[in-house]
Amino acid sequence: QVQLVESGGGLVHTGGSLRLSCAASGFTLEYYGIAWFRQAPGKDREGVSCMLNPRDGSTYYADSVKGRFTISRDNAKNTVYLQMNSLKPEDTDVYYCAAQWLAGSWYRSPSWNYWGQGTQVTVSS
């Protein structure tokens, strides 16, 4: 059974840092593209970052998080991470990890097959 489980969310002050983790089970994460999305109540889920091609390690970021967030993976632990620095109140959202890019734009949620349940990140001003 394929499963993705996020952790590491929480409450942090403006300028603080958090590291989100997404542990995969039921499949080997290193063979798939991976991504992080976020979603606020009443809004569409938006792409934050991805590693589309597991072989070349190239990464992509939304303009709003470039220079502040870093996506990475640990294949030995079958886990993907999102390091978030210099957090702002507008980063407050539920964050989701996704795996197995299907087709289309990476920042659109229908492009991904597997999803975690989400973890809440709240940045206080």
Image (tube, grey):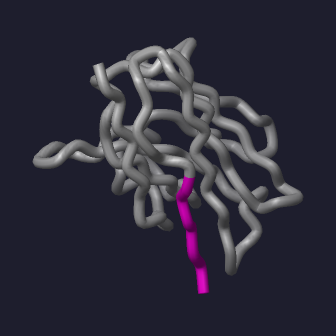
Magenta extent: 1-7
Q: x and y percent of residue 64 in the render? A: 39, 18
As drawn, the residue found furthest toward the left would be 42
Q: x and y percent of residue 115 in the render? A: 46, 64
Q: Is residue 14 rendered to the left or right of residue 41? A: right
As drawn, the residue found furthest toward the right would be 76
Inspect this view and state whether residue 23 appears: yes
Whether 81 is among the magenta residues is: no
Q: Is residue 86 above or below residue 45?
A: above
Residue ID at (72%, 61%): 29
Please identify the quarter of the rendering in which residue 78 is found: bottom right
Residue ID at (82%, 60%): 77
Q: Is residue 26 above or below residue 6?
A: below
Q: x and y percent of residue 83 in the render? A: 62, 32
Whether 6 is among the magenta residues is: yes
As drawn, the residue found furthest toward the bottom would be 1
Q: Is residue 75 rendered to the left or right of residue 37? A: right
Q: Nearer the viewer, residue 20 or 24?
A: 20
Residue ID at (66%, 63%): 23
